Amino acid sequence: MTIPMTELDALPLLARLSHTQRAAIAGVSRIETYDQGVRLFDEGGLADQCWVVLSGCVTIDTAVPQNGRMVLQSVGAGELVGWSWLVPPYRWHFGATVVTPTRAAVVDTAELRRLADDDPALGYQLSLILLDALLNRLQATRIRLLDLYRNPS
Amino acid sequence: MTSWVPTPCRVVERTVETHDCVTLTLRPVTGSLPAFRPGQFAMLYAHGVGEIPISVSGIPADGTLVHTVRAVGAVSRALHDAAPGTVIGVRGPFGTAWRLDGVEDLLVVAGGIGLAPLRPVLGHPSRRTVLVAGARTPEDLLYAGDLLALSDVDVVLTVDRGGHDWHGRVGFVTEPLASIPLDPERTTALLCGPEPMMRFCARTLLGRGVPAGNIQVSLERSMQCGIGLCGHCQLGPLLVCRDGPVTGYPEAEPLLLAKEL
Ligand SMILES: Cc1cc2nc3c(=O)[nH]c(=O)nc-3n(C[C@H](O)[C@H](O)[C@H](O)COP(=O)(O)OP(=O)(O)OC[C@H]3O[C@@H](n4cnc5c(N)ncnc54)[C@H](O)[C@@H]3O)c2cc1C
């Protein structure tokens, strides 16, 4: 299903893009809906797409012996799932599972890279968007290391 | 009657919230307590142990007062363990309240026990409220069942570490803050939790265009008198018991950034 532009225009994540640039991204994306429990990808698989969650929730996990799949992070509405397509070896570092019924824009990352190569202004803005999202996640992960909510006693 | 003399109040209800937090409902043994506003606190006195500041976490219309206490040391442990029937001394109300006049879009961000002082502002039908609450684990989330039952509040719960049967979010509160839909100019944000959490949340909100003047935080310092006399709770130019705990972010930011005051 193609993406209604109103949905992309409303995303804070893409606010720095022009309507035309968002339309270009919509052209390499499709809408998918997923039921609870659907596995989006597994660690080690080929990373050739990413997801912008429009509603619902996806968890990122990794397998730990004796513990099964441990959830490291969840990703909700307005956020990005999937970074491994950005850098070699283009294999998923973690796995991802849909935990509540989810609607997402699925972006064909080979096409996205081509768009960015053809239009450096769009490519630059996309880099900033990805960097911003990555920084948010890195900083939130660092803060979690502080274990701020522990009982001081 | 924000005085030196505690009003004896009986614990009429004790609800276990988590492994270290309980909610106590207190009723004056005789007479009545003065009116508390959300954000204000009382000095609760556990007989023979000591007195500590505890925010009001519920203001029922029946003359009782509700507090949620986390056992972290001698006094909070004694209050936490107070069974129904125990008499506790109450002084207050003290401090500043959340400023809510004219607020239409309310964003409430709480971490850990920081949800307690914010609970009384939830569920007001005249404003759109979004609550983002963080905790260490799903078992540490305060009032979780009650929050999800609030019909007019959008609730986002997130934990540092989820278990296998947790279907909510795993992550820090700044992550949903970065992506939830909000109208920055119209949003009033109330933050309460560990000080670093409030700093990081305020920075995320400033990045989204929420004016600093629309952000309020609740400061915590160890207290003794509660009425601005002893200086125990001094934080830079502020006496938290009198000028706080609720403070605008423009005044609070330099104090939250200082290494030691
Ligand atoms: C305005 C205000 C409102 C408060 N509201 C609540 C509330 O609603 N519910 C609640 O459970 N607590 C609340 N507190 C915190 C509470 O007052 C403290 O936990 C209490 O004073 C600890 O006393 P204690 O004798 O039990 O422990 P102490 O022996 O004094 O302290 C035990 C340990 O806890 C640490 N500690 C003490 N106070 C704090 C604090 N404020 N933040 C982080 N660590 C601390 C100490 O460093 C020590 O490691 C509030 C504090 C303030 C200033």
Image (cartoon, coloured by chain):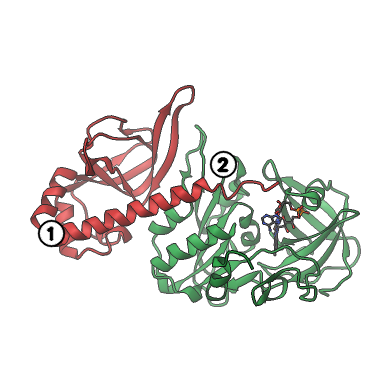
Chain colours: A red, B green
- Give the vertical position of B81 relative to A93 (above or below): below
| Chain ID, mark 1 | A
> Relative to the observer, which residue lies in front, B260 or A124?
B260
- Residue drawn at (60%, 40%), measured in percent from left and top? B139
Question: Does A136 sit left or right of B3 as displayed?
Answer: left
- Residue drawn at (18%, 49%), measured in percent from left and top? A2
Which element is circle 2 on? loop
Quadrant of the displayed image that contains ligand 1: bottom right
Reading the image, the residue beneath label 1 is A120
Question: Does A55 sit left or right of A27 as displayed?
Answer: right
Q: Quadrant of the N terminus of chain B?
A: bottom right
Residue B194 percent location from the top left of the image: 59, 57
**Comparing labels 2 and 1, the label whose residue is closer to the camera:** 1
Residue B147 percent location from the top left of the image: 58, 52
Question: Does B143 sit left or right of A126 as displayed?
Answer: right
Q: Quadrant of the C terminus of chain B?
A: bottom right
Question: Does B48 sit left or right of B70 as displayed?
Answer: right
Reading the image, the residue beneath label 2 is B137
Residue B72 percent location from the top left of the image: 72, 49
Q: How far is disc 2 from disc 1 in space, using C-alphas?
A: 44 Å
In the rendered structure, which amino acid carries the disc numbered 1?
Pro
In the rendered structure, which amino acid carries the disc numbered 2?
Thr
10 Å crowding of disc 2: few (<14), some (14-19), many (20+): some
Residue A40 percent location from the top left of the image: 30, 35
- Residue drawn at (78%, 74%), measured in percent from left and top? B227
> Relative to the observer, which residue lies in front, B210 or A33?
B210
